Image (tube, helix red, strand yellow):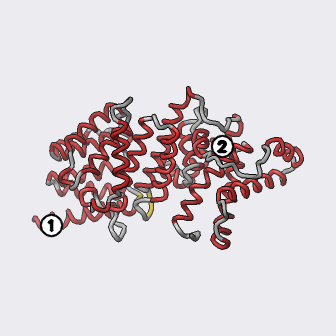
Amino acid sequence: MSAETPEFEGLLRELAPQALGALVRRYGQFDAAEDAVQEALLAAALKWPVEGLPDNPRSWLITVAGRRLVDEWRSESARRAREENVALLEPAGAAAAPERDDTLTLLFLCCHPSLSGPSQLALTLRAVGGLSTAEIARAFLVPEATMAQRISRAKQRIRTSGLGFEEPPPGERAERLAVVRQVLYLVFNEGYTTSAGQQLQRADLTTEAIRLTRMLHRLAPGDGETAGLLALMLLTDARRAARTDAHGALVPLDEQDRTSWNAAFIAEGVALVSATLGRGPLGPYQLQAAIAALHDEAATAEETDWPQILALYEVLERVSPGPVVTLNRAVAVARARGPLAGLAVLADLDGDDRMAGNHRLESVRAHLLELAGDHAAAHACYIRAAGMTASLPEQRYLTLRAAALATRTTSEH
């Protein structure tokens, strides 16, 4: 394994929140612990490729980060007082790194109700998901400086409020779980369709989101929505290899090679959905997983059960209404009842400020106009959509669709 391999990057990404959790549990001071862990990760990236992996990489990171943290404290003016505090905080036998994985406890700390919702999401993506401040800013559609301030305020809030590093009490567990699920789904979505840049998707992020959601599911095996979220991720990520061609170009769902879909993920996702539906309160993640299962179980695009997908979207819109759900329902309506019916649903979104500037509304409209035979209007929508996305693969796909329509329109005249 070398520093350039995805396995090495994946190992560091997996170990980083565990090391941070161990330090926060031992010493407190979230922000100082995070700085120390970042320094330890850098040291690992330089040392391990040359000297090889240590016998226990996790313990190595925790030990090095702990030393960096103590060294930092010793260098400050109140050296003696801080060393005394460290001595008091240091538990007996702390030289050996604890074997427990504190990642989930770290997740709950980041999602503490005393933090604002945006701060919870941003801090979790930074501390547990491993996203950079710039990546989080893109996910939230805010300037990087704004996101940096938000994360800094969240760390300060943890430092000044004295929040304990422990799992939430039973009365707060459901609320905290809901935020944790939302954060993990954001991490997954940023990886599945990267918001900007050269690549359509980032497997490191989807893999990490699935790993953390598996952990969450083990912690809360009876929670239907956590099982639903894991199923949704597996059933969606199962198509990852077929979403791009050999040149990295986007391949739409109907044109994908279904033999390259991940059969193991599909089987696991379907089993999770089957074990969950009808056994408790129905939530949006379970419904979306059921929809994803219908897509994955269709042998061909033509065999997709669109009437049942539409019925599930109608339930989803009642359970968890929102413009993105309406957008997806419009596609299902078009496939079940024709493109004009789908376009009528899209019209309901034209006045929704939440969709202003969102390229997906224009791209779906373009697709439905193309199906309806209005090629000139579809061409204009594809061009507008291409200008609204920061993802280069999506830009290329939309531009090519527009060019193909222009050629067809010219030949028809």
Q: Which mark is residue 155?
A: 2
Determine whether 46 is above or below 361 in the image: below
Please tell me which residue is depicted at 31% across the width and 31% down the height of the picture.
318
Pick the front one: 249 or 361 = 249
Please tell me which residue is depicted at 63% across the width and 71% down the height of the picture.
49
Q: Earlier in the sequence, mark 1 or mark 2?
A: 2
Q: Which is closer to the viewer, label 1 or label 2?
A: 2
Q: How many numbered marks, from 0 up?
A: 2
- Kindly identify which residue carries mark 1: 410
**Looking at the picture, how far across and down is residue 152, in whole percent?**
64, 45
Q: Quadrant of residue 185?
A: top left
Q: Quadrant of residue 196?
A: bottom left
Horizontal side of residue 95 vs 22, given as left or right = right
Q: Which mark is residue 95?
A: none
Could you classify mark 1 by the number of other residues whose Cα lies within 10 Å: few (under 14), some (14-19), or many (20 or more)? few
Q: Quadrant of residue 290?
A: top left
Horizontal side of residue 319 vs 41, given as left or right = left
Could you classify mark 2 by the number of other residues whose Cα lies within 10 Å: few (under 14), some (14-19), or many (20 or more)? many
**Looking at the picture, how far across and down is residue 210, in whole percent?**
46, 50
Q: CA distance from mark 1 to mark 2?
A: 59 Å
Residue 4 visible (yes or no): yes
Query: Is the N terminus in the top left, top right, bottom left or bottom right quadrant?
Result: bottom right
Task: Say which amino acid is labelled 2.
Answer: Lys
Task: Say which amino acid is labelled 1.
Answer: Thr
Q: Residue furthest top?
A: 171
Please tell me which residue is depicted at 53% across the width and 68% down the height of the picture.
5
Pick the front one: 33 or 337 = 33
Residue 343 visible (yes or no): no
